[in-house]
């Protein structure tokens, strides 16, 4: 199995606390919830960043975790790798160019594994609907405590809805003060229609005014606020 090295970004204390809260809420979602999908209404709201941080946080707790980068159009994970990139990724496996074993990478973080997106394919949605995708998810279910799938935004492409029936729950991430209420509602409705429960909403990039200047020093101007509530009360 190939090993990749991840670029780690230091988060301020309060951000880590919010991540822990998100992690805890997720762990309490139920014993039958192991495979989670992350999506948002729009692009650039912070899904991939929060997904990776959440996986790191779960691994830190001693959970065996795998992150699947299912955003084959715009992978984030490859930009978080230091050193050589794996030859094969999700698109190679789903299109039959390699075996499942070839795409599961170990990371330099104990207990954290990853499947990278691979080369950009011409037909990501079709690939995600394939039998191979089902096989990958059931393999991950069998071998890992938690599977977190980073998806593109449901407001722009249908991919998350295609994967959702294979998952136990959806996390909908919303960027504070950016996404219109109606778009958030539409995105929620699209995900609900898949039958995969929306476990909660993550409100991301909450203004630093709430947190004071300390954070500005470390992490730009906006920060996580992971309001990760059970069921539909935030959607
Ligand atoms: N809480 C945050 N505070 C400050 N910056 C953030 C936060 N979350 C994400 N970002 C930044 O926002 C940008 C977009 O993040 P990211 O790539 O994770 O979004 P995304 O939703 O996955 O985007 P895409 O839809 O393109 O996949 C990145 O530059 C990231 O560092
Ligand atoms: Mg992303």
Image: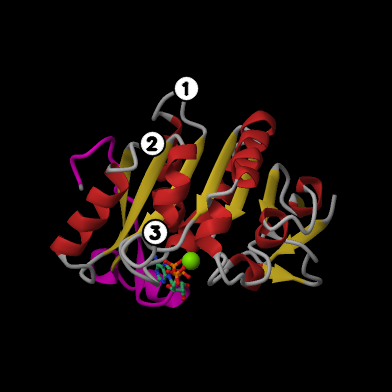
Tag shown at residue 127: none
Residue under pointer 1: 31
Above or below, comparing residue 116 to residue 193 in the picture: below
55 w.r.t. 13: above or below:
above
Residue at 39 percent across and 59 percent down: it is 158
Per the rendered image, the range of residues in magenta is 207-234
Which residue shows up at 66% across the image and 29% down it?
142
Q: Is residue 161 visible?
A: yes
Q: Which residue is mark 3?
A: 158
Q: Crowding near pointer 2: few (<14 within 10 Å), some, many (20+)? A: some
Residues at marks 3 and 1, CA–CA distance in whole angstroms: 28 Å
Relative to 89, does residue 229 appear above or below in the rendering?
A: above
Q: Of the residues under marks 2 and 3, which one precedes in the sequence?
A: 2
Residue at the far right in the pictured view: 1
Work out how far the residue at label 2 is from the one at label 1, CA to CA, in angstroms: 12 Å
Label 3's element? Answer: loop
Tell me whether circle 3 and circle 1 mark residues in contact (CB < 8 Å): no
Question: Is the CB of mark 3 within 8 Å of ligand 1?
Answer: no
Marks 3, 1: nearer the viewer: 3
Which element carries disc 1, helix, strand or loop? loop
- Name which quarter of the figure residue 132 lies in: top right
Furthest residue to the left?
182
In the rendered structure, are the residues bearing label 2 and label 1 in contact, judged by CB atoms less than 8 Å apart? no
Q: Residue at x 39, y 30 (%)?
A: 29
Q: Please say if the residues under marks 2 and 3 sit with CB atoms less than 8 Å apart.
A: no
């Amino acid at each position: 199995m190939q090993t990749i090295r991840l670029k780690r970004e230091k988060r301020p204390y309060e951000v880590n606390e919010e991540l822990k809260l998100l992690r805890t809420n997720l762990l309490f979602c139920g014993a039958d919830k192991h495979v989670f999908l992350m999506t948002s209404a729009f692009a650039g709201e912070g899904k991939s960043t929060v997904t990776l941080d959440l996986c790191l946080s779960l691994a830190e707790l001693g959970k065996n975790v795998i992150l699947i980068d299912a955003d084959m159009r715009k992978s984030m994970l490859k930009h978080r790798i230091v050193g050589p990139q794996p030859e094969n990724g999700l698109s190679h496996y789903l299109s039959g160019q390699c075996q499942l074993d070839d795409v599961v990478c170990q990371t330099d973080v104990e207990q954290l594994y990853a499947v990278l997106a691979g080369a950009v394919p011409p037909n990501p949605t079709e690939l995600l609907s394939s039998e191979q995708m089902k096989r990958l998810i059931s393999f991950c279910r069998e071998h890992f405590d938690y599977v977190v799938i980073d998806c593109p935004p449901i407001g722009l492409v249908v991919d998350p809805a295609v994967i959702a029936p294979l998952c136990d729950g959806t996390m909908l991430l919303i960027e504070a003060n950016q996404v219109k209420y109606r778009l958030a509602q539409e995105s929620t409705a699209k995900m609900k229609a898949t039958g995969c429960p929306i476990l909660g909403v993550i409100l991301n990039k909450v203004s630093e005014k709430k947190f004071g200047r300390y954070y500005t020093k470390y992490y730009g101007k906006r920060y996580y606020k992971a309001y990760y509530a059970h069921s539909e009360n935030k959607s």
